[in-house]
Image (cartoon, grey):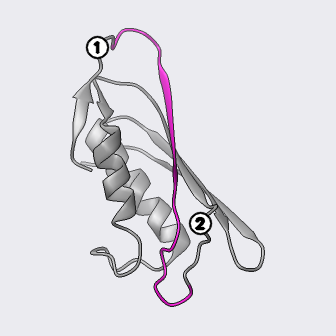
């Protein structure tokens, strides 16, 4: 997810909300279910997330992922912090996970670190 694109109009107040499917994080339980989704929300700064690379990055969390993450809440925390650091703006990430029994909603607010 390291790719960004320039914001052609950074002086305009622009709120961006990107929503993607986000399923099959855990290789044992296959949770969350395919109808689950994650939204990344921010006020646009000097750059924006490039959507194709973001989608690939989110897909990399499925199954045996390089982050070793199986916890649904931790996945949202990692994604929020990475996005905040890359864009250098506060980020809100909301996840709605449909589970085999019930559902789980998680919201994380992250600010750039460093």
Q: Is residue 67 left or right of residue 13?
A: left
Check disc 2: other Cα within 10 Å, few if <14, some if 14-19, many if 20+.
Answer: some
Q: Which residue of the protein is positioned furthest toward the bottom in this rendering?
A: 28
Q: Which residue is mark 1?
A: 8
In the rendering, at what x and y percent does residue 113 appear?
30, 48
Residue lying at 32% horizontally and 44% vertically, measured from the top left: 52
Q: Quadrant of residue 75?
A: bottom left
Residue lying at 42% horizontally and 9% vertically, measured from the top left: 12
Q: Nearer the viewer, residue 30 or 85?
A: 30
Q: Earlier in the sequence, mark 2 or mark 1?
A: 1
Q: Which residue is mark 2?
A: 34
In the rendering, at what x and y percent does residue 38 appear?
54, 53
Residue 62 vs 56, above or below: the answer is: below
Q: Nearer the viewer, mark 2 or mark 1?
A: 2
Q: Which mark is residue 23?
A: none
Residue lying at 28% horizontally and 13% vertically, measured from the top left: 8
Q: Is residue 86 visible?
A: yes
Q: Is residue 85 visible?
A: no
Label 2: state its secondary structure. Answer: loop
- Report the number of numbered marks: 2
Residue 90 vs 104, above or below: the answer is: above
Label 1: state its secondary structure. Answer: loop
In the rendering, at what x and y percent does residue 24 appear?
51, 74
Q: Is residue 72 magenta?
A: no
In the rendering, at what x and y percent does residue 34 appear?
59, 66
Q: Which residue of the protein is positioned furthest toward the right in this rendering?
A: 102
Dominant SS in magenta: loop
Q: Nearer the viewer, residue 58 or 34?
A: 34
Task: Please report the bounds of the magenta region as a residue range.
Answer: 10-29
Q: Is residue 72 left or right of residue 54?
A: right
Residue 56 vs 89, above or below: the answer is: below
């Amino acid at each position: 997810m390291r790719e960004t694109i320039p914001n052609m109009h950074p002086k305009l107040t622009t709120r961006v909300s990107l929503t993607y499917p986000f399923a099959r994080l855990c290789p044992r339980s296959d949770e969350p279910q395919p109808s689950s989704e994650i939204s990344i929300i921010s006020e646009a700064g000097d750059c924006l997330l490039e959507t194709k690379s973001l989608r690939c990055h989110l897909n990399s969390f499925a199954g045996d992922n390089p982050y070793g993450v199986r916890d649904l809440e931790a996945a949202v925390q990692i994604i929020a912090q990475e996005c905040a650091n890359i864009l250098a703006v506060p980020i809100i990430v909301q996840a709605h996970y449909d589970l085999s029994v019930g559902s789980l909603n998680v919201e994380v607010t992250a600010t750039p670190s460093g």
